[in-house]
Amino acid sequence: MFDSAKPPNSDQSRGAEAWQILREAIFTGRFQPGAPLRFHEIQALCAMSVSPVREALARLVAEGLVETEHNRGYRVAPLSRRDLEDLVRTRIKLEGWAIERAIALGDELWEARIISSLHVLTRLPRRRASEPQLMDEEWERRHKDFHEALRAACDSPTLLQICRALSDRADRYRHISLAIETGPRDVDAEHEAIAKAALARDATAAQRALATHFEKTVQYISLRLGAD
Amino acid sequence: MFDSAKPPNSDQSRGAEAWQILREAIFTGRFQPGAPLRFHEIQALCAMSVSPVREALARLVAEGLVETEHNRGYRVAPLSRRDLEDLVRTRIKLEGWAIERAIALGDELWEARIISSLHVLTRLPRRRASEPQLMDEEWERRHKDFHEALRAACDSPTLLQICRALSDRADRYRHISLAIETGPRDVDAEHEAIAKAALARDATAAQRALATHFEKTVQYISLRLGAD
DNA sequence: ATCGTCAAGATTGTCGAAACTTCTATCGTC
DNA sequence: GACGATAGAAGTTTCGACAATCTTGACGAT
C-alpha cells in the first residue's frame, strides 16, 4: 500500500543535488570566495560519497564559480573589483541586447509577466526580518524572475543562456553589496524605471535604466574589494 | 638517472584527459550529433574507469556540447539549423564587440600577431591530403589562433571567454560545412578582408567582414539540417 | 640561524564492484 | 493478432577502498 517508509530515489541524481547545495552555499557566502573546498567537508554537508561531489564540482568549474588545480583540490572562485567591473560592463551590453529584442518581439503576455513579477517583487522586503545583513530567499527568487521576465521575449536561447550565467555570477556580488549598503538605495524605484521603459517599448531608455541598475552594485561594492 | 621506464602520472588529471578526447571525438564527428554516449565505449576509448569519464561528461554538459537525462545516460548535443542561426547571430554581435574593443586598444604587438597568424594560416590547405572531406587538424589550430588573435587585445576576460565557448560550439558546424561545400569559397580571402579592416582600425568594416565570414557557413549548411 | 631532507599525516584522484534504473524480448491472456 | 506483464539484459549511478600526491613539521647538516 504505502511505501512511505523509504525515501528511496528522488527524481534527480545525487550529483545534481550536490550541485544545488554547493551553489547555494557559495552564493550565500557559507563558503567564502577563495576558500578551499575539501571533500571531507562537502561529503558531510551533502551526505554522499565522493563521486557525485566531484561531478558537481566539475560542473561548477565549467560555470566559473569554482576553480581547480590538479592534485590540489578545488576552491571557491575569488571575487575582485576588476572581475565585477568586467562582469557588469558585459552584462550591460548583453542584457541590453536581450531586452532590446524582447521589446521588439514581446506580446501582451510578455508585458503581463513583467507587471506581475514586478508587483510581487515590490511587496517583499529585500532583507531577512531575522538577519538583516542577509538577503531574503524569496525576494531573491522574485528578483531573478523579474529580470528573467524582462528578457523573456527575446528569441535567442544562446543569448538568454549567457545572460542567466552572468546573472548567477553577479549574484555573489549582490549578496556582498547588501551587507554593505548604508546610503539610501531605492531598488524598487530602479526596477520600476526599467519596467516602465520596457512597457513603453522604449529600448534605449530601458537599456539606460538597466545600466544604471547594474552599476549601482559596483558603486557600493568596489570600495570593499581588492583590485584583482 | 632516467626514470623513463614508467609514464605514471601526467601533469593533468585523467578527467581532463577524458574531456579532451571526448571533445575531439565530438568535434570531428567520431561521435555523431544526437548519438548516445555509452560508458562502456568511452572507457574503452580513453582507457580509464567510470569516475573521470563522468567528470568529463559533466563538464561537457555545462559547456553545452553534451546533454543528459537522469538514469538515461548522456548523448551528444544535436545540431540544428535553428541552433546554428541563433549561434551565428549571437557570435556576430559578441565577436563584433570584441574586435571593436581590440581595435580600440590593440598595440603593434596585436597587429603583428594578426599578421603572423594569418600568414601561417594561408600557407596550409584546409582539407586533409588523405581524406579531403575532413578538416586538417593543424589548419584548424591555426584558424582558431587567427580568430583568437583578432580579439586578443580586447580587455574583457568575460567577453573573450564567451567568444571562445561559442566558437567551440560553431566548430561542429564548421566540420559539417566542409564536407558539404561544393561551390567555390575563398576562405583565405575572407580572412584577409577581416585582418585588413582590423589593421586599418576600421571597426565597422571589420565587423561587417566578420559577419559575412560567419554567415557563409550558415548558407552552406542550412540546407542539410532539419529546422530544429 | 637557515636551509634542505625526510617521514607521517592529510587530501585528492582513480578504480572496480554493488545497487539501482531503464530497456528488450518473451510469454501468457484476451 | 494485440496487449500487457515479466524476467533477464544492458546501462547508469553511487559507494567504499586504495593509490598517488601534497602538506606539515621535525631533524640534521652547513
Image (tube, coloured by chain):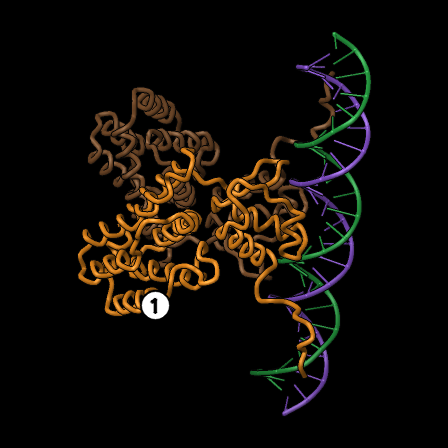
Chain colours: A orange, B brown, C purple, D green
| Secondary structure of the residue carrying numbered label 1 | loop
**Horizontal arrangement in the rendering, residue A15 relative to residue A78 (left or right):** right
Front residue of this view, candidates B208 and A96: A96
Is residue A222 shown to the viewer in this render?
Answer: yes
Is residue B179 shown to the viewer in this render?
Answer: no
Mark 1, residue position: A123
**Horizontal arrangement in the rendering, residue B73 relative to residue B182 (left or right):** right
Say which residue appears at 32% left-offset and 61% top-offset. Answer: A152
**Horizontal arrangement in the rendering, residue D26 relative to residue B127 (left or right):** right
**Horizontal arrangement in the rendering, residue B109 relative to residue A8 (left or right):** left
| Spot occupied by residue B62 in the image (x, y as percentages of width and height) | 49, 50
Tag 1: amino acid: Arg
Say which residue appears at 19% left-offset and 53% top-offset. Answer: A205
| Spot occupied by residue A146 in the image (x, y as percentages of width and height) | 33, 61
Question: Which chain is home to disc 1?
Answer: A
Q: Tag 1: Cα neighbours inside 10 Å, few (<14), some, or many (≥20)?
A: few
Q: Is residue A3 above or below residue D16?
A: below
Q: Is residue A215 above or below residue B1?
A: below
Q: Which quadrant holds residue B213?
A: top left
Front residue of this view, candidates A65 and C25: A65
| Spot occupied by residue B119 in the image (x, y as percentages of width and height) | 34, 22
| Spot occupied by residue B45 in the image (x, y as percentages of width and height) | 62, 43
Q: Which quadrant holds residue D23?
A: top right
Say which residue appears at 27% left-offset and 67% top-offset. Answer: A115
